[in-house]
């Protein structure tokens, strides 16, 4: 995985390479998929959700330009894999998941693996997690029609957000935004395919 998928496609950030090499991805996928855990594709994690392809996890993480002092917000905990990769690099990770059973399962695996710098919340990630704001970086792992406005408020000046944007059923664009003078400067990185954001009604 590291040679053929991550390094070969140009991931260079040492923190990201270390984290991707260290986090045991097979612990985050259901038993039935263990033998496929390091393959070049997303995998089902239950509840109709997926753990992203390894390269996409590495790319999104690298785009944030993280350091060991950072506080990061992740929306869409899912299996907890992305949270573990972040937790290897930064000081604190805050992760919000709308499906309670997924949040609990991820929390249990991450505890078993010894992570102590990840906090979990069950709720609608559209609203971010105000109590711990502002964040140095925000990563969204579901697709949204637009960048949820509360996230801009919760991002530090100079902070970065990476998010798949696109309407349901359409191609999504992976967008990298940087907050400059209170506004987001946006850049499209590549086309992606993520599960759509769910809302609480
Ligand atoms: N980062 C995850 C991948 C998650 S897939 C990993 O590493 O495994 C996207 C996740 O977003 C799913 O678990 C889904 O339940 C969750 N999700 C969808 N809509 C959401 C919302 N509005 N708020 C929070 N989480 C949401």
Image (spheres, rainbow, N blue to C red):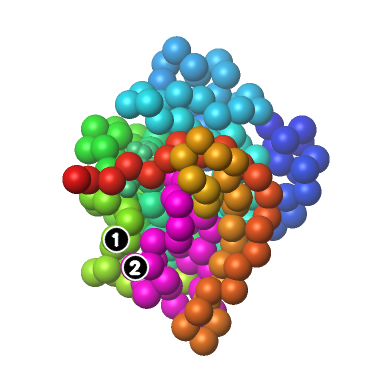
**Residue occupying the far bottom of the picture:** 181
Say which label, 1 or 2, has the lower sequence index. Answer: 1
Which residue occupies 51% across, 35% down?
Answer: 169
Q: Is residue 95 visible?
A: yes
Q: Is residue 77 visible?
A: no
Which segment is the magenta one? Answer: 137-163
| Residue placed most toward the observer, 134 or 185 | 185
* Residue 6 lies in quadrant: top right
Q: Which residue is labeled 1 in the image?
A: 127
What is the distance, in whole Å, between disc 1 and disc 2 at their CAs?
6 Å
**Neighbours of disc 2 within 10 Å: few (<14), some (14-19), many (20+):** some
Element assignment for label 1? helix
Which residue occupies 45% across, 12% down?
Answer: 32
**Residue occupying the far left of the picture:** 201
Q: Quadrant of the C terminus?
A: top left
Which residue occupies 52% across, 52% down?
Answer: 165
Residue 185 location (% of width, % of height): 59, 74
Q: Which residue is labeled 2 in the image?
A: 150
Residue 175 location (% of width, % of height): 59, 58
Left or right of 14 in this view: 161: left
Location of residue 64 with respect to 49 vertically, above or below:
below
| Residue placed most toward the observer, 123 or 106 | 123
Residue 132 location (% of width, % of height): 29, 69
Element assignment for label 2? helix
- Magenta stretch containing residue 118, yes or no? no
Residue 49 location (% of width, % of height): 40, 30
| Residue placed most toward the observer, 69 or 194 | 194
């Amino acid at each position: 995985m590291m040679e053929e998928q991550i390094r070969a496609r140009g991931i260079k950030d040492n923190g990201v390479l270390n984290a991707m090499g260290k986090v045991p991805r097979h612990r985050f996928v259901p038993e039935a998929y263990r033998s496929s855990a390091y393959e070049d594709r997303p995998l089902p994690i239950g509840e109709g959700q997926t753990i992203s392809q390894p390269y996409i996890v590495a790319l999104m993480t690298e785009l944030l330009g993280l350091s060991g002092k950072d506080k990061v917000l992740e929306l869409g905990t899912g299996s907890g894999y992305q949270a573990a990769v972040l937790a290897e690099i930064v000081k604190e990770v805050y992760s919000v998941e709308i499906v309670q059973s997924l949040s609990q399962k991820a929390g249990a695996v991450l505890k078993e693996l010894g992570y102590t710098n990840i906090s979990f919340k069950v709720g609608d990630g559209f609203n971010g997690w105000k109590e711990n704001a502002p964040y140095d970086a925000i990563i969204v792992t579901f697709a949204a029609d637009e960048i949820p406005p509360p996230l801009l408020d919760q991002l530090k000046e100079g902070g970065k957000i990476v998010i798949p944007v696109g309407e349901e059923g359409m191609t999504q664009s992976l967008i990298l935004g940087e907050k400059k003078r209170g506004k987001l400067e946006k850049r499209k990185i590549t086309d992606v395919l993520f599960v759509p954001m769910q809302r609480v009604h």
